Image (spheres, rainbow, N blue to C red):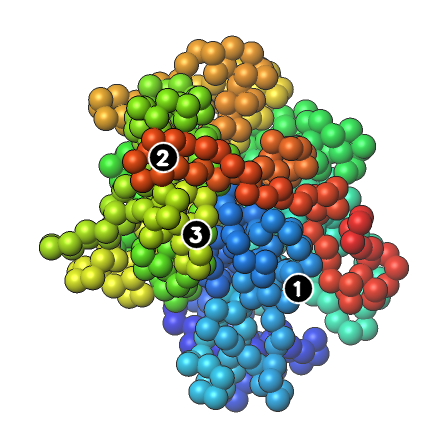
Amino acid sequence: MKILNLTVLSALFFLLFTSCSDYLDKSPAAGLTEADIFKSFDKFQGFIEDAYDCMSDPMNGNNSTNFNMGDDILQVSNNYMPSQNSDYRNWETSIANYFYSPTTSVNGEPLKFNSNPYIIIANGSTSYTSGDGYASLGYWDGGWLGIRKVNIAIANLDKMTVTYKDAPLQEQKDLIDGQAHFLRAYFYFQMIRIWGGLPYIKRVLSPNDDLNFPRLSYFACSDSIEKDLLYAIDKLPVNWDATQTGQITKGTNEGRLTKGAAYALLGKAMLYAGSPLMNGTVTGNYTYNNDYLKKSIKYFGEVIKLSALGGGTTYDLLPWSNYSDNFFMFAKKIPARGKEGILNTPNIGHLRRCQIGDFLTSMGGFGSGDGPLENYVQYFGMNDGTAFNPDVYNTPSINPFANRDPRFYKNIVYDGRILTKNATTSKKAEFYIGGTDRGGAGRSDTGYGWQKFRDSTIYGAGSSYNYSADVNRSLPVIRLADVYLMYSEAVNEVYGPTGDPSASTDCNVKAWEALKAVRDRVITPAGTPLPLPSSYYADQNSLRESIRRERAVELAFENIRWYDLRRWYVSDQPEYMRMDVLDFDAGHTYFKVRSFAKKIFEKKHFWMPIKDTQTQLYSAFSQNPGW
């Protein structure tokens, strides 16, 4: 989505963010000055797009299940936070999680590992890197770095005086201004939902400043996020192609920040602020806060009005036949989310090879052998719309893997399913006790495999596709199905399942209707949409549980479950601490649900610890409780 090639700026950017003084001095390598960068839209947009690269992508890390930290995945290695020990201090040092930011230098030179977070490579030395550029960036350092970048952009906006290719100068300044305010809000939202309230910095800091900034409350940070995003909404277009500036790069503007993306992020930020954990942290009352939920409804309503559900044409769910295009595509193509994609991170390095390490070795993985937990798989219901009944395990004549919600087959690899195949051979999964894919290094301990971000059959010997070169994967930040479910949740809590939300929004979609829209996209073998039984929205409690179950299924393995369980303030309840596996024999003559372990989740785990070295800098910057 680049407007220009930024290679010439890379050396300058290294100086820019490693020094607080003279950070915009002319770089000999780049041959550019501060005036060169900020006076015209093309170069200024390049500066902003470098801030886009601070948007952390969990899938561009060591293993792609390292963000599945809820009740969804069994990750047996104790080196990872998602494992049962819940070692959240691990984020400070391990490259196998998406919060991590590494040591920044070796012998005074910037460092880059193959799977490390974002490090700017200044000199292209081959002694420790295969080339210049960026790797992925952890949320903590990446957030602060991104905030500094956009604050620099905002501070220098008045220096833009030269129009680019005859498009209106004010339009181009608005586009820069809107993106900068959006990104500042985005970085803060990502950080506060993990670490809680933080100082909200809105200017460029210098060594002469008093840096004694206190931590703000979650509400105070959310209010600042709201102001930044409302400002961005006023500056950003619904569609870049519809602007004169966007016409310059027409057809290649997908991924740029838009008005709809700002409304979606704003709705999500307000939903989080109004969720039980966040409300309880500020007020002591661990229930929903309707004031924030009403704001959430208002802002999500603006997105829905742009969508097919609300009569708009900007957004729509991908058809069921193209559902997987949200997550992966073949032949090096970036996933084509079409009208479903609302907000995504940039694709860095095409994100291919690094995302299959945690698949089974028989699926082309490297040996972690992570598997979905039985307690999570039970959220996937039946194709007649009803819930899965685990009593079926007591009747071996019934196949528990048959007639499930069609999304079961998009996400879950079960016993007997083909893992790999080519023209002459095929390999079926053997997850039964004693099977070749059950237990031990690179195999599943749970009785299942997972596959949301890849087709289960493409890695067989002789396949026409190569996993490290031909399959491109990406993780949506916000897609339309998520917006429908978040809107449904907020409306249900304030107005009930069938209540009129018009007091908060001029969008007339009811809570149960938004839930139904997500299920309507799912097509059963009979060729009909997945039914929504009326019992699922008979009252507020019923719909609340239905929405939470639907989020587990529709958004499985998308870096959402851990956040949902925390904000609902349920992560420490026994139901969500289960780590169950399914035992059975080759002939399926018996099935037994077995507790593999009990996940550790204490009150302190609702918030991630901050590095002690940073909380000890001054007294107003305090550590989170329990850490």
**Residue closest to the eye, 574 or 265:** 574
Which residue is located at x 44 percent, y 11 percent? Answer: 534
User: Element at badge 3?
Assistant: loop
Q: Which residue is mark 1?
A: 92
User: Element at badge 1?
Assistant: helix
Residue type for callout 3: Gly
Can I make out residue 383 in this image?
Answer: yes
User: Element at badge 2?
Assistant: helix
Q: Quadrant of residue 586?
A: top left
**Residue closest to the eye, 166 or 319:** 319
Sequence-wise first label, 3 or 1:
1
* Residue 443: image location, x then y, percent: 40, 54
Q: Quadrant of residue 448?
A: top left
In the visual, does 153 lie left or right of 344? right
Q: Is disc 3 in contact with disc 2, using a CB cutoff of under 8 Å? A: no
Q: Residues within 10 Å of mark 2 (few under 14, many from 20)?
A: many
Residue type for callout 1: Glu
Sequence-wise first label, 3 or 2:
2
**Residue closest to the eye, 250 or 39:** 250
Residue type for callout 2: Phe
* Residue 168: image location, x then y, percent: 43, 56
